[in-house]
Image (spheres, helix red, strand yellow):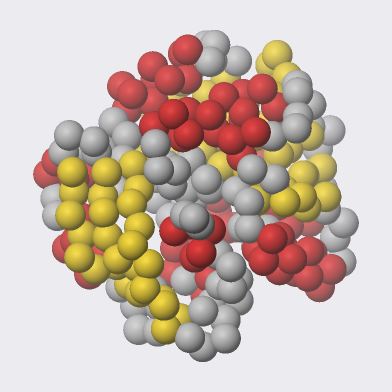
Amino acid sequence: MKQWYESLFENYAHKYDKECFVQGTIGECDFIEAEVGRDKSLKIIDIGCGTGRHAIELTKRGYNVTGVDLSENQIKRAREKAQEAWVTIDFQTQDARNLPFNGEFDLAIMLCEGGFSLMETDEMNFAILKSAARALNGQGKLIFTTLNGLFPLFHSVSEFYKSAQNEGQSQCKECSFDLMAFRDHNTAVFEDDSGNKRELKCNERYYVPSEITWLLKTLEFKKIDIFGAKLGAYSRNDKLTTEDFEMLVVAEK
């Protein structure tokens, strides 16, 4: 049986690119560049790259990027966009839980819930982190965002989705947050690229900072920093608070 995230991205590339939460690419790539000291010789892997927005922007800036995603439809659109932008990028359809790379990359990025936190079990989510760690060399760095488990302790996830909703974009309804599992169960309502209205039962895992730190330490990351993630404006100056819906994690081996 297909999982919700597989069904979601079957025919949802053009519409996905219009969503409000994917509009921060430039500022996010500025942060990534600063984190790698603008070293263009580095090899970067974009895990859960979607339609390739970060991979394309970084390649335009002179970096060597490989993009991987589970969805063939998203990868197809990423290749089209790369062609339109006159850049050459190795986009591959791969499962983030089991990447075929071993120590080949200097930096792994996984942004906008690129795979991690979407999986149906904690073990599967951990497999993604493990796979990303394995793809990195001995001095590698991992930058990713994930849902902040501190947020639902103080706020209604349902109210947050309502406030972030824009006309003509996807919506989340019937949210129920499970405090024992730190999972939000909801129904995503969206229109696919063919104009069909779709509804999917989704569930996503929220993480608290201490869990993320522990998981990354078990994968032998030595330095782990966690910040609030502001759309299009990632910054080390953003201390993570209970007001942040997402957190930004920077981990170094």
Compared across the picture, whether 159 is left or right of 61 comes to: left
Q: Position of residue 24 (x, y in %)?
A: 51, 60
Front in this rendered view, residue 29 or 218: 218
Residue 232 in sight in this render: no
Residue visible at 75% across and 23% down?
Answer: 102
Residue visible at 51% across and 79% down?
Answer: 192
Query: Vertical placement of 89 versus 183: above or below?
Result: below
| The furthest residue to the bottom | 195
Front in this rendered view, residue 238 or 127: 127
Q: Position of residue 184 (x, y in %)?
A: 26, 50
Query: Vertical placement of 133 versus 57: above or below?
Result: above
Residue visible at 56% across and 72% down?
Answer: 12
Residue visible at 64% across and 43% down?
Answer: 95
Q: Quadrant of the C terminus?
A: top right
Query: Vertical placement of 54 versus 47: above or below?
Result: below
Q: Quadrant of residue 119?
A: top left
Q: Position of residue 43 (x, y in %)?
A: 78, 34
Q: Position of residue 88 (x, y in %)?
A: 87, 56
Q: Quadrant of residue 176?
A: bottom left
Compared across the picture, whether 208 is left or right of 109 comes to: left
Count of numbered tags: 0
Front in this rendered view, residue 194 or 22: 194
| The furthest residue to the front | 1
Residue 127 in sight in this render: yes
